[in-house]
Amino acid sequence: MTRVIRVKPQEPVAEPSCLSEQFTYACHSKMKTKVIEAFDYVNAGNIDKAIETLKSIQPVDSYVLVVVDYYIGSISFQNQMLKQAITYLNRAVDSKELNAKHLKKAMESLLEIHIKLRNYDQAG
């Protein structure tokens, strides 16, 4: 008997359609534009430029900084830059400002990274 294993495709970090719901305040409009630009770079395969674009965002409040850390960590994770992903995702999680959806995704990503790196004490 042949066993078939189905693998769930990895979800994208975010899509521009999702972003419009997250950044509703006027002070976040520049951030929204930069995040969309960063994801355009990700889609084009230019990860370094995407991260550079996210790092160029001037935080107007602590939430902006947390969201930038989350997106850099998520992009790093998806592109196997695991140590960088740990740094940024930990900062986002430790801030206690992520919304529930992003917190869950960040925690799942960190768990997967630590298992891949065999950091079992960190994974638990």
Image (cartoon, grey):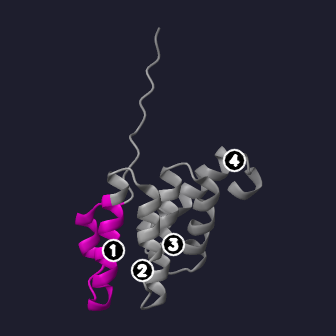
Query: Pointer 2: what residue?
Result: 57
Q: Assign the magenta stretch its main secondary structure.
A: helix
Q: Amino acid at mark 2?
A: Ile
**What is the span of residues highlighted in magenta in the rendered image?**
14-40
Q: Which mark is residue 2?
A: none
Front disc: 3 or 2: 2
Separation (CA) of disc 2 from disc 4: 30 Å
Q: With 91 as the anchor, is 70 left or right in this view?
A: left
Q: Quadrant of residue 99?
A: bottom left
Separation (CA) of disc 1 from disc 2: 7 Å
Q: Split into 4 quadrants, where in the image is the C terminus?
A: bottom right
Q: Amino acid at mark 3?
A: Asp
Query: Pointer 1: what residue?
Result: 34
Residue 15 shows in the view: yes
Q: Quadrant of residue 15?
A: bottom left
Separation (CA) of disc 3 from disc 2: 11 Å
Residue drawn at the location 55% of the way across and 61% of the way down: 107
* Cβ–Cβ under 8 Å for marks 1 and 2: yes
Where does the image place residue 106, in percent across and percent down from the top left?
Answer: 52, 63
